[in-house]
Amino acid sequence: MRKMRNGQADFSVNSTRFLSRRATLRLLWSVTVSAWLSIPLAVPADAAEPIRVMTFNLWHGGDAGKQPLSKTLEVIRAAKPDLLGLQEKPGYAQGATRPDHGRKLAALLGWNYFGQGESTAILSRFPIVTNTPRKWGVQVRLPTGREAWMFNAHLMHAPYQPYQLLGIPYAGARFIKTASEAVSEARQARGSQVDELLAELKPALAARQPVFLTGDFNEPSHQDWTPRAAQAGRCPLAVEYPATLAFTRAGLRDGFRSFFPDEVTHPGWTWTPRTKSDDPKDRHDRIDFVFVGGPNVTVKQCEIVGEARKFAAIIVQPYPSDHRAVVATFELE
């Protein structure tokens, strides 16, 4: 299209040679059509709409990994999310305060930012409409004009039941032997957080809008620690971990386990890229999640973001966090 001045097409006309009326009309029609085609069209509200949702524990704002913030930004850009739940967003203290690296990342991305409190934040490519009273979630407006909910959580890290069951010392927690003990310890550690989160999440589900939940739960999934997985040696014993069980009973689906239903062939470990998988002083597991709820939402893909092809589909090296990230692609029908 020709250069525009003051909103009008800039036509160069020789003063001694004027265009014919037919040629002038043809040019004006061409300019009008070109301008019309350049206007972005609204997507119908009932059109299928893809959306990528990511969870990412930064590991003390990325500072603990001794990598610049640009490396954490590289992880996010490689995953290409639309909605992002961050955990451990503050960096190491600089004087009396800890810098909010989540806010810095939002500014670098040019995204909307919602600080949920001390350690968590939600970043969104879409406008944020409102938030829940306790800040567990926000409502966003999608390009079609539809609205969806995004929740994000960082649940209590200790006591950590896999370590308790395997006799690995952590945070002074006692050692345990049975599945019932593991469930009891998990409820004591995170039960109140799960209840608070569900109290704000259930009304969003009842409104029949798309609902996403991301987080570092610091607790494995009941869909991973199954009798079948225990028989295959993937876990010490079957445990119905209560956090993920509560969310699925509320009507949410685990994006990774929906796309990869076989817990034996696809363990999906997110904890941790910092130790070897056979390290006797550690236990690798899947504790970072992207859940989805609401009508007419299809899980199209789910990918782990990490340091090596053996463990992840999206690779960034050197990898800056002690948690692999998870990004799921959904389609809103």
Image (cartoon, rainbow, N blue to C red):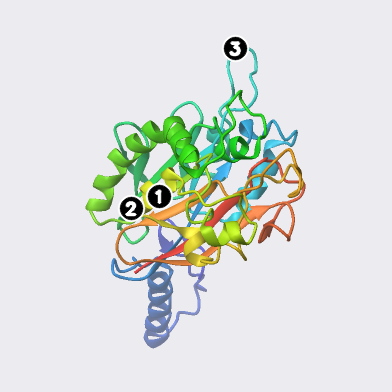
Q: Quick one: 170 or 20, which is closer to the camera? A: 170
Q: Quick one: 333 or 154, which is closer to the camera? A: 154
Residue 102 in the image: state x and y as whole percent: 55, 35
Q: Total label count?
A: 3
Badge 2 vs badge 1, beta-carbon distance below 8 Å:
yes
Please report the residue visible at 63 percent of the width from the left and 56 percent of the height from the top.
234
Residue at the extreme front of the image, as rendered: 177
Provide the secondary structure element on which disc 1 rests.
Answer: helix
Q: Residues within 10 Å of mark 1 (few under 14, many from 20)?
A: some
In this figure, which residue is indicated by the disc labeled 1?
245
Q: Is residue 279 above or below residue 169?
A: below
In this figure, which residue is indicated by the disc labeled 2?
249
Q: Nearer the viewer, mark 3 or mark 1?
A: 1
Q: Is residue 15 above or below residue 139?
A: below
Give amino acid for label 1.
Leu
**Residues under labels 2 and 3: Cα distance?**
43 Å
Can residue 216 be spotted in the picture? yes
